Image: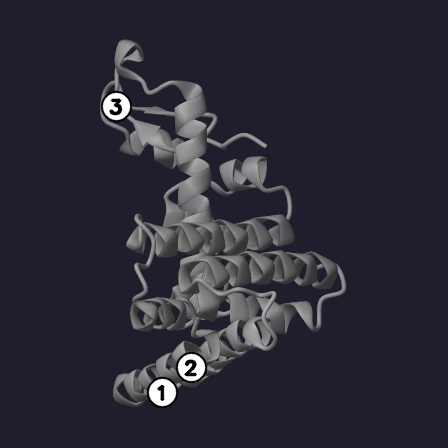
Amino acid sequence: MGAVSTVGDRMDRSPGERTDRSTGERTDRSPGERTPKQDRSRATRRRLLEAAVACLAERGWAGSTVSVVAERAGVSRGAAQHHFPTREDLFTAAVEYVAEERSGAIRALFPQGAAGDRRAVVAALVDLYTGPLFRAALHLWVAASNEEQLRPRVTELEARVGRETHRIAVDLLGADESRPGARETVQGLLDMARGLGLANLLTDDQGRREKVVAQWTALVESALRD
Protein backbone atom coordinates (compact mmCIF):
# COMPACT_ATOMS: atom_id res chain seq x y z
CA MET A 1 0.00 0.00 0.00
CA GLY A 2 1.50 3.33 -1.01
CA ALA A 3 1.91 6.44 1.09
CA VAL A 4 -0.94 8.95 0.94
CA SER A 5 -0.01 12.58 0.39
CA THR A 6 -2.30 15.09 2.09
CA VAL A 7 -2.85 18.76 1.30
CA GLY A 8 -1.18 19.70 4.57
CA ASP A 9 1.80 17.52 3.71
CA ARG A 10 2.21 19.26 0.36
CA MET A 11 1.97 22.70 1.97
CA ASP A 12 4.64 21.81 4.53
CA ARG A 13 7.20 20.80 1.95
CA SER A 14 9.94 23.12 0.88
CA PRO A 15 10.53 23.67 -2.87
CA GLY A 16 11.97 20.55 -4.43
CA GLU A 17 11.00 18.36 -1.48
CA ARG A 18 9.27 15.12 -2.44
CA THR A 19 7.72 12.13 -0.71
CA ASP A 20 9.31 8.83 -1.62
CA ARG A 21 6.42 6.54 -2.55
CA SER A 22 8.29 3.37 -1.62
CA THR A 23 9.20 4.51 1.90
CA GLY A 24 6.72 7.25 2.78
CA GLU A 25 9.60 9.55 3.70
CA ARG A 26 10.19 13.14 2.68
CA THR A 27 13.29 13.97 0.72
CA ASP A 28 14.71 17.12 -0.81
CA ARG A 29 17.29 15.33 -2.92
CA SER A 30 17.39 15.99 -6.62
CA PRO A 31 16.80 12.93 -8.85
CA GLY A 32 20.51 12.49 -9.44
CA GLU A 33 21.25 12.44 -5.71
CA ARG A 34 18.67 9.89 -4.68
CA THR A 35 19.67 6.70 -2.91
CA PRO A 36 18.88 3.61 -4.99
CA LYS A 37 15.33 2.39 -4.36
CA GLN A 38 16.44 -1.00 -3.07
CA ASP A 39 18.74 0.62 -0.48
CA ARG A 40 15.97 2.98 0.63
CA SER A 41 13.61 0.06 1.01
CA ARG A 42 16.10 -1.88 3.15
CA ALA A 43 16.76 1.17 5.31
CA THR A 44 13.03 1.74 5.82
CA ARG A 45 12.50 -1.90 6.77
CA ARG A 46 15.35 -1.72 9.28
CA ARG A 47 13.98 1.43 10.90
CA LEU A 48 10.54 -0.15 11.18
CA LEU A 49 11.98 -3.23 12.87
CA GLU A 50 14.03 -1.18 15.32
CA ALA A 51 11.05 1.05 16.07
CA ALA A 52 8.82 -1.98 16.65
CA VAL A 53 11.21 -3.46 19.20
CA ALA A 54 11.57 -0.11 20.99
CA CYS A 55 7.78 0.29 21.12
CA LEU A 56 7.30 -3.23 22.47
CA ALA A 57 9.89 -2.63 25.17
CA GLU A 58 8.40 0.73 26.19
CA ARG A 59 4.66 0.35 25.54
CA GLY A 60 3.97 -3.39 25.54
CA TRP A 61 1.84 -5.20 23.00
CA ALA A 62 -1.37 -3.24 23.59
CA GLY A 63 0.32 0.11 23.01
CA SER A 64 2.38 -0.93 20.00
CA THR A 65 0.19 -0.46 16.95
CA VAL A 66 1.41 -0.28 13.37
CA SER A 67 0.61 3.44 13.34
CA VAL A 68 2.68 4.06 16.48
CA VAL A 69 5.63 2.14 15.05
CA ALA A 70 5.39 3.91 11.69
CA GLU A 71 5.37 7.31 13.38
CA ARG A 72 8.41 6.41 15.47
CA ALA A 73 10.23 5.15 12.38
CA GLY A 74 9.39 8.31 10.46
CA VAL A 75 7.42 6.65 7.68
CA SER A 76 3.76 6.50 6.66
CA ARG A 77 1.44 3.76 7.88
CA GLY A 78 0.97 2.69 4.27
CA ALA A 79 4.71 2.25 3.82
CA ALA A 80 4.84 0.17 7.00
CA GLN A 81 2.09 -2.10 5.70
CA HIS A 82 3.89 -2.39 2.37
CA HIS A 83 6.79 -4.06 4.19
CA PHE A 84 4.71 -5.88 6.81
CA PRO A 85 1.09 -6.54 5.80
CA THR A 86 -0.03 -7.54 9.31
CA ARG A 87 0.82 -6.50 12.84
CA GLU A 88 1.98 -10.05 13.60
CA ASP A 89 4.34 -9.94 10.60
CA LEU A 90 5.89 -6.74 11.89
CA PHE A 91 6.49 -7.76 15.49
CA THR A 92 7.67 -11.31 14.95
CA ALA A 93 10.09 -10.03 12.30
CA ALA A 94 11.23 -7.27 14.66
CA VAL A 95 12.12 -9.58 17.53
CA GLU A 96 13.81 -12.03 15.14
CA TYR A 97 15.81 -9.21 13.59
CA VAL A 98 17.12 -7.91 16.89
CA ALA A 99 17.78 -11.43 18.17
CA GLU A 100 20.00 -11.99 15.15
CA GLU A 101 21.68 -8.64 15.75
CA ARG A 102 22.34 -9.57 19.36
CA SER A 103 23.75 -12.95 18.37
CA GLY A 104 26.09 -11.19 15.99
CA ALA A 105 27.04 -8.70 18.68
CA ILE A 106 28.01 -11.49 21.08
CA ARG A 107 30.20 -13.13 18.47
CA ALA A 108 31.73 -9.75 17.66
CA LEU A 109 32.81 -9.41 21.31
CA PHE A 110 35.11 -12.38 20.79
CA PRO A 111 36.27 -12.20 17.15
CA GLN A 112 39.24 -14.46 17.88
CA GLY A 113 37.27 -16.70 20.22
CA ALA A 114 36.84 -16.30 23.96
CA ALA A 115 40.40 -17.45 24.66
CA GLY A 116 39.25 -19.32 27.74
CA ASP A 117 37.73 -16.23 29.41
CA ARG A 118 34.54 -17.90 30.51
CA ARG A 119 33.59 -15.15 32.92
CA ALA A 120 33.43 -12.70 30.02
CA VAL A 121 31.27 -15.16 28.09
CA VAL A 122 28.90 -15.69 31.02
CA ALA A 123 28.59 -11.92 31.49
CA ALA A 124 27.89 -11.41 27.78
CA LEU A 125 25.19 -14.08 27.79
CA VAL A 126 23.55 -12.51 30.84
CA ASP A 127 23.58 -9.15 29.05
CA LEU A 128 21.68 -10.79 26.20
CA TYR A 129 18.73 -11.23 28.55
CA THR A 130 18.85 -7.87 30.30
CA GLY A 131 18.61 -5.54 27.29
CA PRO A 132 15.67 -4.20 25.26
CA LEU A 133 15.48 -7.36 23.14
CA PHE A 134 14.44 -9.50 26.08
CA ARG A 135 11.96 -6.91 27.32
CA ALA A 136 10.38 -6.68 23.86
CA ALA A 137 10.36 -10.46 23.43
CA LEU A 138 8.66 -10.89 26.79
CA HIS A 139 5.82 -8.62 25.74
CA LEU A 140 5.50 -10.63 22.55
CA TRP A 141 5.37 -13.91 24.48
CA VAL A 142 2.64 -12.59 26.77
CA ALA A 143 0.64 -11.47 23.73
CA ALA A 144 1.19 -14.84 22.04
CA SER A 145 -0.31 -16.64 25.04
CA ASN A 146 -3.62 -14.90 24.26
CA GLU A 147 -3.44 -14.42 20.47
CA GLU A 148 -4.10 -17.60 18.48
CA GLN A 149 -2.66 -16.16 15.26
CA LEU A 150 0.52 -15.05 16.95
CA ARG A 151 1.24 -18.09 19.15
CA PRO A 152 2.62 -20.59 16.59
CA ARG A 153 4.84 -17.98 14.96
CA VAL A 154 6.33 -16.81 18.25
CA THR A 155 6.75 -20.40 19.48
CA GLU A 156 8.69 -21.31 16.34
CA LEU A 157 10.76 -18.13 16.57
CA GLU A 158 11.62 -18.68 20.22
CA ALA A 159 12.70 -22.25 19.54
CA ARG A 160 14.94 -21.14 16.69
CA VAL A 161 16.49 -18.27 18.64
CA GLY A 162 16.97 -20.56 21.64
CA ARG A 163 18.85 -23.11 19.53
CA GLU A 164 21.08 -20.40 18.07
CA THR A 165 21.84 -18.90 21.46
CA HIS A 166 22.67 -22.33 22.85
CA ARG A 167 25.00 -23.04 19.93
CA ILE A 168 26.79 -19.71 20.43
CA ALA A 169 27.17 -20.41 24.14
CA VAL A 170 28.61 -23.87 23.46
CA ASP A 171 31.12 -22.46 20.98
CA LEU A 172 32.23 -19.56 23.17
CA LEU A 173 32.49 -21.63 26.34
CA GLY A 174 34.37 -24.40 24.55
CA ALA A 175 31.90 -26.95 25.88
CA ASP A 176 32.20 -30.57 24.77
CA GLU A 177 28.59 -31.72 24.75
CA SER A 178 29.61 -35.34 24.39
CA ARG A 179 30.64 -35.21 28.04
CA PRO A 180 27.95 -36.00 30.63
CA GLY A 181 26.36 -32.86 32.06
CA ALA A 182 27.98 -30.39 29.64
CA ARG A 183 24.83 -29.68 27.66
CA GLU A 184 22.77 -29.29 30.82
CA THR A 185 25.35 -26.92 32.26
CA VAL A 186 25.14 -24.63 29.23
CA GLN A 187 21.34 -24.76 29.19
CA GLY A 188 21.22 -24.09 32.93
CA LEU A 189 23.39 -21.02 32.39
CA LEU A 190 20.97 -19.70 29.76
CA ASP A 191 17.98 -20.43 31.99
CA MET A 192 19.69 -18.56 34.82
CA ALA A 193 20.39 -15.61 32.51
CA ARG A 194 16.73 -15.56 31.48
CA GLY A 195 15.72 -15.46 35.14
CA LEU A 196 18.03 -12.51 35.79
CA GLY A 197 16.48 -10.80 32.80
CA LEU A 198 13.02 -11.22 34.30
CA ALA A 199 14.21 -9.78 37.62
CA ASN A 200 15.75 -6.86 35.76
CA LEU A 201 12.34 -5.86 34.38
CA LEU A 202 11.38 -4.43 37.77
CA THR A 203 14.68 -3.34 39.27
CA ASP A 204 18.20 -2.86 37.95
CA ASP A 205 20.04 -5.02 40.45
CA GLN A 206 23.44 -4.94 38.80
CA GLY A 207 25.39 -5.60 42.00
CA ARG A 208 23.57 -8.85 42.72
CA ARG A 209 23.79 -9.81 39.07
CA GLU A 210 27.57 -9.48 39.10
CA LYS A 211 27.80 -11.82 42.11
CA VAL A 212 25.59 -14.36 40.37
CA VAL A 213 27.75 -14.12 37.24
CA ALA A 214 30.86 -14.80 39.33
CA GLN A 215 29.27 -17.83 40.98
CA TRP A 216 27.99 -19.24 37.71
CA THR A 217 31.39 -18.76 36.13
CA ALA A 218 32.87 -20.95 38.88
CA LEU A 219 30.17 -23.59 38.28
CA VAL A 220 30.76 -23.54 34.54
CA GLU A 221 34.52 -23.79 34.96
CA SER A 222 34.12 -26.79 37.23
CA ALA A 223 31.58 -28.57 35.01
CA LEU A 224 33.42 -27.96 31.75
CA ARG A 225 36.97 -28.41 33.01
CA ASP A 226 39.09 -30.43 30.58
- Report how far apart the C-alphas of labels 3 and 2 lie in the structure: 61 Å
Q: Looking at the image, which residue sits at the far front?
A: 226
Quadrant position of the C terminus in the picture: bottom left
Amino acid type, mark 1: Gln
Q: Label 2: how many residues lie within 10 Å, few (<14), some (14-19) or many (20+)?
A: few
Residue 38 makes an appearance in the image: yes
Q: Looking at the image, which residue sits at the far right?
A: 148
- Residue occupying the point 44% across, 32% down: 42
Q: Is residue 38 left or right of residue 153?
A: left
According to the picture, the residue beneath numbered tag 2 turns out to be 222
Q: Nearer the viewer, residue 171 or 188?
A: 171
Q: Label 1: how many residues lie within 10 Å, few (<14), some (14-19) or many (20+)?
A: few
- Residue occupying the point 53% across, 52% down: 96
Q: Label 3: how many residues lie within 10 Å, few (<14), some (14-19) or many (20+)?
A: some
Indicate the position of residue 23 as horizontal and vertical percent values: 44, 31
Closer to the chain start, of discs 3 and 1, is 3
Q: In the figure, 163 relative to 7: above or below?
A: below
Q: Nearer the viewer, residue 104 or 135?
A: 104
Residue 61 makes an appearance in the image: no
Amino acid type, mark 3: Asp
Q: In the figure, 130 relative to 80: above or below?
A: below
Closer to the chain start, of discs 2 and 1, is 1
Query: Are the residues flagged by discs 2 and 1 in contact, CB closer than 8 Å?
Result: no
Indicate the position of residue 90 as horizontal and vertical percent values: 56, 49
Q: In the figure, 7 relative to 131: above or below?
A: above
According to the picture, the residue beneath numbered tag 1 turns out to be 215
Indicate the position of residue 7 as horizontal and vertical percent values: 40, 32
Q: Nearer the viewer, mark 3 or mark 2?
A: 2
Quarter assignment of residue 1: top right
According to the picture, the residue beneath numbered tag 3 turns out to be 28
- Report how far apart the C-alphas of labels 3 and 1 lie in the structure: 56 Å
